Image: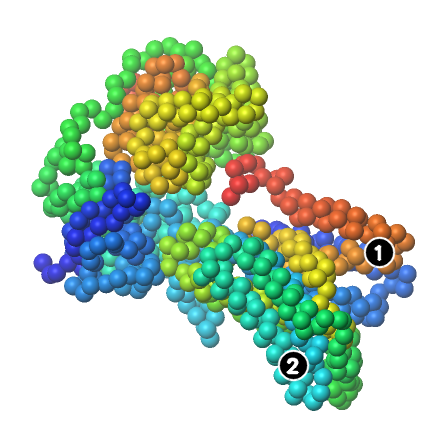
Amino acid sequence: MQGPIVELSDVSISFAGVKALEGVDFACHAGTTHAILGENGAGKSTLIKTISGVLKPDTGSIAVNGREVRFAGPAEAADAGIVCMFQELSLIPDLSVADNISLQRPPRHMGLIDRRAQIARAEALLARVRCEDVDPRAMVRDLSLSRRQMVEVAKALGRDPKVLILDEATSALTQKDVETIYGLLDELRADGVCSLFISHRMHEVEALCDRLSVFRNGRHVETFGKGERSDAEIVRLMIGRDVTAKFPPKPAPKEREPVIRLEELRWENRLNGVSLSLGKGEILGIGGLDGQGQKELLLALFGVLKGVEGKVTVGEGDGLAASPHAAKTGRNRIALIPEDRKTEGLMLSLSIADNIVAAALDKVSGRGVLDQARLDAAIAEGMERLQIKAGSTEDAVKTLSGGNQQKVVLAKWLMIAPDVILMNDPTRGIDVGTKQEIFRMMRALADEGKSILFYSSDYAELIGCSDRVIVLYDGRVVSELTGEAITEEAIVAASLNIQGEMA
Amino acid sequence: MTRWIGQNRGFAAALALFLALYLSYHLMHPRGFSTAVLVQNSNELVAIGFVAMAQTVPVLLGGLDLSVGAIMTLAACVASWLLDGTPLQIAFGMIATLAVGTAFGLLNGLIVVYGRLQPIIATLATGAIAIGLALLIRPNPGGNVDGDLNWALTNSVFDFAETYGIGQDGEATWLAPFVNIPLPLILLFGMACLVWLPFKRTVTGRTIYAIGSAEGAAFASGLPINRARIAAFTLAGFFAACGGLYLAIQTSTGNADVVQAGAYTLNSIAAVVLGGTALLGGTGGVIASILGAMILRAVSFYFRILDIDPLLQPLIEGIVLLAAVSAVAFRTFRVKNQLELFR
């Protein structure tokens, strides 16, 4: 094997005294797909930010092709062939797809950006990621999250990477797109590109990667080839302890008193007559391909959408909430764990404490004035209940790792003591350990009598967590599965709406 | 076309509003439509039009520039000393005036980028400095501007051609289709087309939009953020100086009027909003802001032909402005997913 394309020697970085990376030696080679694994706050994000020039190491050095480099910013790293697809998308919502794809180095004609050439270039790159359906002239803000992510892939490819970093690149993608990405990574490997791949989905890592590196607490634990370690061993390396069951045990199926009943719910062209009932103490999973109305269903129940038609019964005959405020203060309190925690779930620059109490300020105040003692008690309870790991509750929530941020979102909504919890992909971009904590928490809440309506893009989660699964297709429920019938085959078949032919 | 309207709703709404206002103004005008009225209206548009253009660029970044009115005033005071003499001297005077404003804008940009100050507070301070300098240059209103220049630039194309003996004193056939166009309009839109449209198609120009839309993403994509910020404020200074230069030519004087400078700054913000540029940045453009300025002016024209107590003018203008901004913001009523209001 030739020398490594990127090599880090003894790199350390700390933020406000907390070591994010400590004495890391790491190398990756051309023509490999290299997975980086680790729990929350293990240093994965810091590592890739360092390699891609966003962060500068406090000590240690980085060499590219054997030559030491010091990047002043992401632009210089990109010039050196290191291109990163960030987990937080790096697209500009108010610019067109074509503008975004050629953002840094647009084709020019007499010094000015050549729009026609730019569109042709975008079309070629979109075709390469099999997204011919995306119009290069459309605004990025009008695209769905999964399309945006594919545009991000096209943008990264257009920069002719030598090292391509994919941070949770498949987290919002549909199954078809994921396969496209698999194909692309194979092509890139054949072209001698090194892909650094961060994912929390083990089966992806197994399918794609030649080498794996495990990080824990800011240290590089071990790097090994595919097949040299079993799954159980890898998980142990990541979290430093044994993990027995991934999902908590489910109770036996039983009749439940309904808390929410929907009949023929319709909205725009996204919901085309959804009927379902959610029982008390039940975890109802929503499956289906991306964009079949799952998100709209949750938003409608939370009072975000206007012009919803159909019959809705909440609890003892209440109707649909008119606004999020009405949803959370109604007789049956409803909470929504949103899809995007960074914009809808959290106020990133406010403190952890402020975020935890944000939805339940009425509970910690008397006559409109906040009561410090009740505030402190509530915050302490939230931190304790979800075991949020943080230096101080006064730290800005943006300083936390993704998993801990999601816990803050959960703590915030549990503070209102909701009867119904709507969850929109609550484990997106979260490490295995925190995922398991969230699953346990969900089951515990259900056992207390709360009802949970839960959308996940990961079939394994639906199978492992739900008492019942409904599958949406084109804004309608096409299948309902209970108990033993919840299998991957059944969900996939229903998602593609092919069960008629299968039966 | 449908796509264009979909992506430029604010602009389309502003255009419709302006056409409605301006056409009914002419219908109600006692003497009907005439070139003289058009020329006069255009003259009143230019200074606020340029200042609105100036304001647009920092707003696209997501900032406000409170110094544009002051830079315009400073430029006008500089110009009132320099626009006389031989053609060469006048040309030099124009360039010097524009250079002063541009330099002031550059200063704003450098302070915002390297001083790491919020644009709104940095430009509040530099605006006061600009007014201070203007008062030093022109303690009392006055000035000397070449009479031909004043006449040629504030009338129709025909008068311009006649003054400078172009196209057989304006009688040439090739000039015939254009003779009735007011020259101020040509100056305003010409500057927008010659400077802004090409600039928008540079990487720096696009970076301005990117910063206003998603600054973190712009940085992560390796765009030249500092350069774009400095360029935005510099361009604002340049456009403001264009406004000041025209104001000096139009009035033949320089007047370091503090109140007027402040009014221009605030009206420029109103014009930007009316044109459909988002105050949070990222969407909109300079041409739209000229349209916004045209709406503002069209409203004030009504006071001339309708018999309204002048004391009521600010009150009525305020109400109309509020209504107009609401009309442009009409989209919020049609949003079905309320979360989109916060994006």
Determine the secondary structure under disc 2.
Answer: helix
Reading the image, the residue beneath label 1 is B303
Subunit of label 2 = B
Q: Vertically, is A175 above or below A127?
A: above
**Picture coordinates of residue A478 (x, y %)?**
40, 27
Q: Vertically, is B175 above or below A119?
A: below
Along the viewing direction, whichever of A27 and B261 lies nearer the viewer: B261
Determine the secondary structure under disc 1.
Answer: helix
Q: Is residue A31 left or right of residue B180?
A: left
Q: Residue at x 29, y 61 (%)?
A: A71
Q: What kind of residue is marked 2?
A: Gly
Is mark 2 in CB contact (under 8 Å) with mark 1? Answer: no
**Picture coordinates of residue B233 (x, y %)?**
54, 64
| Quarter of image, res B290 | bottom right
| Quarter of image, res A67 | bottom left
Q: Is residue A218 left or right of residue B115?
A: left
Q: Vertically, is B245 above or below A452?
A: below
Q: Residue at x 83, y 70 (%)?
A: B36
Reading the image, the residue beneath label 2 is B93
- Work out which quarter of the rendered image holds the C terminus of chain A and state it: top left
Along the viewing direction, whichever of B166 and A183 lies nearer the viewer: B166
